[in-house]
Amino acid sequence: MKTINQIIGALPAKRRTKVRARAKQLIGEEMALRHVRKARQLTQEQVAKTLKIGQDSVSRLECRSDLLISTLQSYIEAMGGSLKLVVEFPDGRAVLSNLGATEHERKKPANRAKRAATR
């Protein structure tokens, strides 16, 4: 049976470069949340306490490659931050907001405006 290094070593140089770049990207994505937490000088235990979950759950969350936006938002807020997603297009950028808000919370400002207009 061949090892992964033998399989990658048999690939053309251009393909090996792409594989290594993608591996680096995936490793970077997996480590991103852990790095943010460490940069904030917080332990998994501290974040877990704020989120009211176990330290083991924080560890698993940090290793996930696919998160719900609401989960990511809660994690960032537990560290004292706020989550904003920036979408980049060739002709500009957009910042997405209200991603973690419930439908009820999103409707509140509109309802207030309606009530103010009828007064």
Image: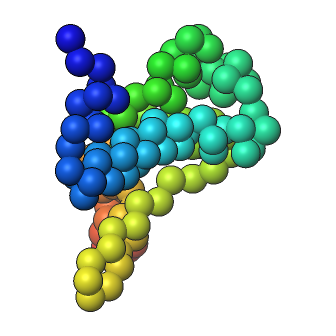
Q: Nearer the viewer, residue 80 or 88?
A: 88
Asked if residue 67 can be seen in this view, the reply is no
Q: Quadrant of the N terminus?
A: top left
Q: Residue furthest right?
A: 41
> Which quadrant of the view contains residue 48?
top right
User: Residue 76 location, x and y as percent?
Assistant: 57, 43
Q: How many marks?
A: 0
Q: Residue at x 53, y 37 (%)?
A: 31
Q: Quadrant of the C terminus?
A: bottom left
User: Residue 33 location, x and y as percent?
Assistant: 55, 39
- Judge from the rendering whether residue 117 lies leftward or rightward of residue 27; answer left or right: left
- Judge from the rendering whether residue 57 lies leftward or rightward of residue 109; answer left or right: right
Q: Nearer the viewer, residue 55 or 64?
A: 64
Q: Residue at x 36, y 34 (%)?
A: 65
User: Residue 118 location, x and y as percent?
Assistant: 31, 73
Q: Residue at x 32, y 61 (%)?
A: 111
Q: Residue at x 20, y 43 (%)?
A: 11
